[in-house]
Image: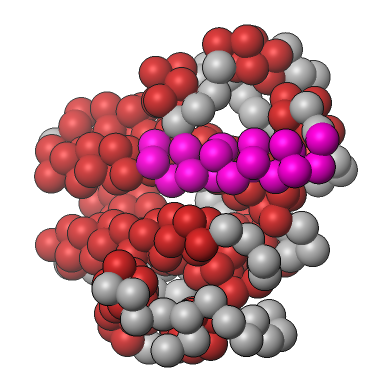
Amino acid sequence: MNLFAAARAVLAERDIENKLEGAARLYEDWQAGRLRLEDFGAPSDLCGLPPRPELADPRSMPRRQLSSPENHAALIHALTHIEFNAIHLALDAVQRFPELPPEFYGDWLQVAAEEAYHFRLLREHLRTLGRDYGDFPAHAGLWELARKTAHDPLARMALAPRLMEARGLDVTPDIQRKLTGYGDRAGAAILDIILRDEIGHVAAGDRWFRWLCRQRGLEALSAFQELVSAPGMPRPRPPFNEAARKAAGFSAEELAALAAMPP
């Protein structure tokens, strides 16, 4: 089976359950040696989405306080949506960038499978709250980032895992504290699993970002700072989850330099 065609098929799938099963099966097939790295073909810009949730501009999304059952469910829905989009980002990295080492594709197939697992955990939890995925508006900010970095794997590795997903490492402990304070220990426990896995996802992005920098003769910190300084890009914002970021590949020197960047 051709890896790239198979990844494009799962990426284009609109049915949620088929997409989740497809992401898990792709990684199983990779581990079993059933996927071929030949006939790359043309990358696809098609990302299959279910009819719901309704997608809105990220700037229009309300900031909700964890002060009611409705806002509690909305927070879990927002986290669920992040994991759904993360499946797409991982699969897009597989199907978009040719002529990279086999380990690159294996890493992002593993990430896609783990993001699908995270989505299942959060969706099941959301259902215990009497709601389901699609019941609240969401935004396509992560997929917009995929479009902005479609031209270059180095930019993708810098801005998806090392910027956006690393931000998730920073904010997750605070979300867990809020959930625990609200009485949602089950939700906080799910985020323990997700945080553990996301350290590995950021580490994969860090590893391939640095590999690509070496291939191009670039100094990694300078290259990263240049990319995140582009117009419209959010800056890394302290306080950082230093333990998680260091486990994912960031050095103390790099964290200090990022903290000193102007807003």
Q: Which residues are magenta?
A: 199-217
* x 86%, y 43%: residue: 231
Image quadrant occupied by the N terminus: bottom left
Residue 11 in picture, x, y percent from top left: 50, 80
Residue 8 in picture, x, y percent from top left: 54, 83
> Is residue 195 placed above or below 97 in the rendered structure?
above
Figure disc tally = 0
> Is residue 30 placed above or below 168 in the rendered structure?
below
Task: Residue 145: say if magenta.
Answer: no
Query: Magenta region's main secondary structure?
Result: helix
Q: Is residue 110 visible?
A: yes
* x 58%, y 82%: residue: 38
- Whether residue 48 sits left or right of residue 136 in the image: it is right
> Is residue 115 placed above or below 189 in the rendered structure?
below
Residue 205 in picture, x, y percent from top left: 55, 44
The residue closer to the viewer here, 83 or 217, is: 217
* x 24%, y 51%: residue: 69
* x 27%, y 27%: residue: 177
Task: Residue 210: say if magenta.
Answer: yes
Q: Is residue 82 visible?
A: no
Residue 126 in picture, x, y percent from top left: 23, 61
Q: Quadrant of residue 209?
A: top right
- Whether residue 39 sits left or right of residue 51 in the image: it is right
